[in-house]
Image (spheres, helix red, strand yellow):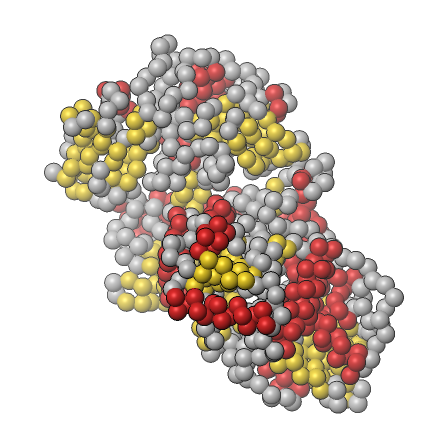
Amino acid sequence: MSGRYDVAIVGAGVVGCAIARELSRYELRTILIEARSDLGDGVSKGNSAVLSTGADTPFGSLECKLVSRGHQRYVAEAPAMGLPIKAIGSLTVAWNNDERRIVEQLQAETVAAGFHDVVVVGADEIYRRAPHIAPGAVAAMWDPEEGIVDPFSTPYAYALDAVTNGVTFQDRSPVEKAERNGAGWHLHTPRGVVEAGIVINCGGLGAAKIEALGGFSDFVMKPRRGQFLVFDKSARTLLDVVLKPVPTPLYRGILMTPTIFGNILVGPTSEEIDDPDDWRVTQSGIDALLAAVRRLLPQLLDHEITATYCGIRPGTERPEYRIIPRPDERWLTVGGIRSTGLSGSLGIAEHVAGLVVGEMIGGRRKPSHTVVSVPSLAAGERPWLNGKAADPEHCEIMCHCEGITLGEIREAMASPLAPRSLKALKRRTRVMFGRCQGFFCGARVQALFERLSAERST
Amino acid sequence: MMPRDAEVVVVGAGPAGLTTAAALAERGVERVLVVDRDDEAGGLPRFCSHLGFGWEYTHRLETGPGLVRRLLRRLDSNAVTLLTRTSVLSVKPGPKVELVSGRHGHMHVEPRAVVLATGIRERPRSARLVPGKRPAQGILTTGQLQQMVARGVPVGGRRAVVVGTEHVAFSILLTARHAGLDVVAMVGAEDRIMSYAVAGLVARTMGVPIHLSSTVDDIQGADRVESVALRGPSGQRSIACDTVIFSGDFIPDAALMPGSGIAVAAATSGPSVDQYGCTSAPGIFAAGNVLRAVESSGLAAIEGARVGTNVAAYLEGLLAWPDVGTCIRLTEGLAYIVPQRWVPTNDSGYATRSLPISLRALADVPRARLRLIENGKEVWAGREMKVLRHRRLALPAAILDRLRGGDAALHLDPV
């Protein structure tokens, strides 16, 4: 595939997809190109699924501004996209008097930075909100706005919106060479040459590599791995807030939170890694997470573990976003999105679109756009409860642990962004994401996936 | 019969569920609904084509599918309605059952009794906390591989490592061969195999090395598994393979228990039951491997048949819903006992049948003896025997009838 575009976005993670959606509101020919066979398959597939308000980012930074704006927009726009959000609030808990002093100071700074709802609460309030945590909490910072979201459906909803509103999506296209010409760039991929007026590098962990192809070297990647444990849904009653430790300047610590799907999530660890592809869960990581559980919420250990995974934060040598517009070079870098890409995505997208149309190539806003929504996969929201009880395919469950129906799989496979692999289907629908990890349904789902894929290609 | 007219709902159409339904029909219960969420009845045995299924119940050498066919033939279709592709979403006190299926949509049923026969599953790699990468392809449980082979889904690998040495790990050697997979190693955490000695001999005859006292330390691979690293007595070693099969490590499928009023037994993760199969929730019985992981399909079938008889007695008023009764305490060295509770018999018409006892030890003991003690007095003593932790310990159910409602404890005394 090849062609001429005004804008080429390189990298279909949550940030690239959000930018594609944002630019689809303008009279611009935009293409979103992705190296892998699915969107959201790199950094965006492994995070804590907590929507930060920005209150835990460095105050005064671009990151803080864009995450705050991203949070505000997500709360406003997610419902129309069908994306679930639950503002459960967070407790940053002090376990001794030293930590209490830090929490009090942190709260004062947080309020001063504009997060006016954040308060310090005492032990009574902590145990009212989180009755099952270990004894000994002395004080906490309560942020009522922090929420949990669906991290897999979010980039998908953005990309589906973008594609529906005119953006071209091209997967399996790692950029191998970038050539500057008078009007912009020629991006060489195994699936053809993409000509674009400007390039937006959203390469995530590969951002520095993409930069190098364009001849830029403003930063180096310092990837940090974060490991997680997902506990069985039977544990959901143990916790209904985001539980955080007192942060240090370098590490926000291991948090515990319910997920929007009804599990309890514990993580992340934080390890600097050399190989940006080292997606390993390690024994020491698992041990650190279990130790935190034993300390903070020991009853969780009575429940089964459903999954382990890790994410890799695309940090650079400086603890900040590396958003660099280069109007003369017709190149815009969106790098170093550290660990706040999901929370900041809509804020980053707005900021980047502002740079594109304001400083780089211009572009008129379209008078209207098509509203796109995706099916909700949040706990308790199943098709037979959401007006589809009369549709037989939406009442036949294929994945028993998560209650995912034949109808949902068919719909995912009929999407303009149909999954090309079983793992992509998992992210779209949650099949095989439950406690049995495919023991019961794996064979049936795979057979169905292969049949529907074959039908689609003929 | 429409589902909402059911007098009894049996959840799960594996061996235990099918024999429960057959026993209910034999006792004259006319509206029995058996639901199963899979596309066909039979439970896990229908994916196991080797011999040995149901022996204790049928006394015939049969394959898994063979056993299922036999059990299905015994069902009286006038009394029993079998609904597959039907999921039970919840069981609530009452009992109330919430179902969803393509055919009947979303509905609520209020039968007089419910029997949970939901069986077991294997713990996947994630629950076993095995470190390493998570390639999208090549990491399976035995159950998933058996289903893939039975359903003709390509496995797509050549070289497999099997983790676990329980019976099922050896049965998978045959399944793997059927799927075109060469098993290049078996790995067991224990210092001996958790199956019959002859199984190990068969594996070695097939040229499959068994690494004991060893664990998987790392998994490598991007899209598909490329290798595993083992840690064992002789240090670390890497084995090139494209498939890792996690076998055994079974756990009751207890998803329906939260919210049902059923007390869970910590030792088994299954429902706590008395000798009739009554859970702590009135009207809700349980049978088969959901009671514990794991016994043979034959024992599960026997349990189903007996619980079916007891449910019929309950419906006829011959079995009043029992109290909690006496919890049989286990002393050091014993892992679990099912049934966990014993109630003084209140069956005047000999209409009930006690569950067989399944009892396991935590560790191997060369010579030991079981003793049942009530209020400090020995009620029963077994013969000396060799205790293997992967085998059921023989304990006749009739000895529980000697209990008088005092403090009952079961001892395993090394000799």
Residue closer to the observer: B93 or A305:
B93
Q: Quadrant of residue A4?
A: bottom right
Q: Quadrant of the N terminus of chain B?
A: top right
Residue closer to the observer: A53 or A160:
A53
Residue closer to the observer: A180 or A122:
A122
Q: Residue at (30%, 30%) from the top-left corner?
A: B327
A85 displayed left or right of B369: right
Residue closer to the observer: B193 or B23:
B23
Q: Position of residue B366 (x, y in %)?
A: 16, 42
Tell me if residue A249 comes above or below residue A81 in the rendering. Answer: below
- Observer able to see residue A194: no
Residue lying furthest right in this view? Answer: A367
- Observer able to see residue B320: yes
B38 displayed left or right of A283: right
Tell me if residue A359 comes above or below residue A259 in the rendering. Answer: below
**How many numbered discs?**
0
Q: Residue at (61%, 50%) from the top-left corner?
A: A378
Q: Residue at (81%, 73%) from the top-left corner?
A: A29
Q: Quadrant of the C terminus of chain B?
A: top left
Q: Residue at (55%, 28%) from the top-left corner?
A: B96
Q: Position of residue A457 (x, y in %)?
A: 72, 57
Q: Position of residue B259 (x, y in %)?
A: 50, 36
Q: Position of residue B374 (x, y in %)?
A: 20, 26
A169 displayed left or right of A216: right
Residue lying furthest top in this view? Answer: B349
